[in-house]
Every structure is written in C-alpha cells, then in structure tokens.
Image (tube, coloured by chain):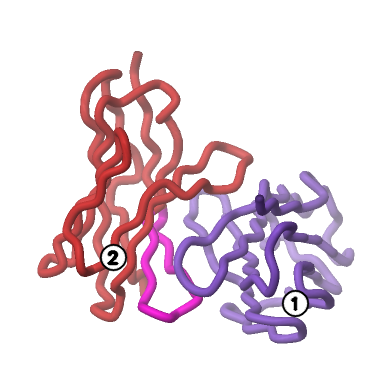
Chain colours: A red, B purple
C-alpha cells in the first residue's frame, strides 16, 4: 500500500524555467510533509517542509504548496539550475510519529 | 554541529556471508536512529528505527537485524546475506519527529 505517491518517475526542464514536482498521499493522518533531494551514491538532503496548518512555504528558489482537500503537494523550483538535477523524494508523517513515509522519487534533469 | 557517519562506503559480499554496517552520530544526544534501503530504481524503504538504546522497531520482516549498543551508534546486521539484500543502505537521525538527516550511505552488492 503506497501511501505517498510520486507518479512521475522523471521530469526534464530547461535551465531557467520552473520545475514542478508533484506528490499525492492517501493517509489523512499525515500532517507534515517534506521534500528531499538526492544525488547518486549520496544520502538524501532535506530541502523544505510544510505542516498542514499552512498551504505554502518558501525558501529561496524552492516553494512547497499543500492542497489538503486533494491530498496533494508540489515543489516548485524557480529558476531551475543545472545543480538541481537530482532525484527528489517527498515524505510525510503524522504529528508525533517518528517515522517518515517516502514516495518513490522523481528524477529531475535540468537541460542547459 | 551534528554529523553522521556510515561505513563502509561500498561493500561486495558473497551470498551466505554475514553483514555488519555501522552508523554513528556526533553532536546530538538521544537521537532517533533509522536504517533505510534504496533498491535499484525504488524509493526509500524503512527497515528499522530506534528511539533509544536497546529499543529497535522492525518495519519489514527479513533476514536483517539492527542493534543500538550505544546512544549514538546503530548497527545493521545479517547472519547470511541473500542476493535480494543488494542495495543502497542509508542511516538517518532525527530529534523527535519531523526532519530526518541522512548519512552518506553504503552500497552493498551481494554476488
């Protein structure tokens, strides 16, 4: 039972344009969401998070949007840069739960 | 600042051999500790987590085990490796719930 889904395994975007990565979840108990970035042969790096009391959180070029009614979140990267090429994982947890549930990842390729 | 170490970085083992992967965290006390596996082309699968010394929760039944002999040390073990144990193993830590911070990972190839 995949509770966190990233339906696009890959995405290619021109440098300078906006990258939009999507994530859907099914567990209504989830109320905290995170995005991680992973380069090959390295551990994931935390990027940005959002709690269910908000619908948007920004950090520099990265913005996460949360639509609770649709159980959907997205990560926007503007402008996209070559160093953004990586696999992006979304993750979710319920308040007070030590565990994160990860999606299967989306490989983002930025085309120069 | 906090740092997390994993070793070895890469490992090639024959089927049926034992396994021991080690993870240590510096700069924090009483962290939650986690072992994940990323199989080829797959997402991150939580294998074990620990909220304290000697406290291990197993998420997926398999031939792997975990131990936490010290506050900031987490060990992943197997008595006999299977081909299906190949993958990229990641250790992570957190303080309470929320963000987890990952180590550099161990690439395990079972032949």
Any mark on residue A51, and which? 2
Callout 1: SS:
strand
User: Mark 1 = which residue?
Assistant: B65
Q: Name the residue: 53% across, 61% down.
A: B100
Q: Is residue A94 magenta?
A: yes
Percent position (x, y) of residue A92?
Answer: 36, 66
Quarter of the N terminus of chain A within the rendering: bottom left
Measure the C-alpha gap from mark 2 to mark 1.
Answer: 33 Å
Q: Name the residue: 62% across, 73% down.
A: B32
Percent position (x, y) of residue A112?
Answer: 35, 13
Callout 2: SS:
strand
Q: Are marks 2 and 1 in contact (CB under 8 Å)?
A: no
Magenta highlight range: A90-104
Percent position (x, y) of residue B97?
Answer: 48, 73
Write down the chain letter for disc 1.
B
Q: Nearer the viewer, residue B48 or B111?
A: B48
Q: Name the residue: 41% across, 55% down.
A: A104
Residue sitting at the far top: A112
Label the magenta part by its dominant secondary structure: loop
């Amino acid at each position: 039972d995949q509770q966190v889904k990233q339906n696009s395994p890959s995405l290619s975007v021109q440098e300078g344009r906006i990258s939009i990565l999507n994530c859907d979840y099914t567990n209504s108990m989830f109320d905290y969401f995170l995005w991680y970035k992973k380069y090959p042969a390295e551990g994931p790096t935390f990027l940005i998070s959002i709690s269910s009391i908000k619908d948007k959180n920004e950090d520099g070029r990265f913005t996460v949007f949360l639509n609770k009614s649709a159980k959907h979140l997205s990560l926007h990267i503007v402008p996209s840069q070559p160093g953004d090429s990586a696999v992006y994982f979304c993750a979710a947890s319920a308040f007070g739960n030590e565990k994160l549930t990860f999606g299967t990842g989306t490989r983002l390729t930025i085309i120069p | 600042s906090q740092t997390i170490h994993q070793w070895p970085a890469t490992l090639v083992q024959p089927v049926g051999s034992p396994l021991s992967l080690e993870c240590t965290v510096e700069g924090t006390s009483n962290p939650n500790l986690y072992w994940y596996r990323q199989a080829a082309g797959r997402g991150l699968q939580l294998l074990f987590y620990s909220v304290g010394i000697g406290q291990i929760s197993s998420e997926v039944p398999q031939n792997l085990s975990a131990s936490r002999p010290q506050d900031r040390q987490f060990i992943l073990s197997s008595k006999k490796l299977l081909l299906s144990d190949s993958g990229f193993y990641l250790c992570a830590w957190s303080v309470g719930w929320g963000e987890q911070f990952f180590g550099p990972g161990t690439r395990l190839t079972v032949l």
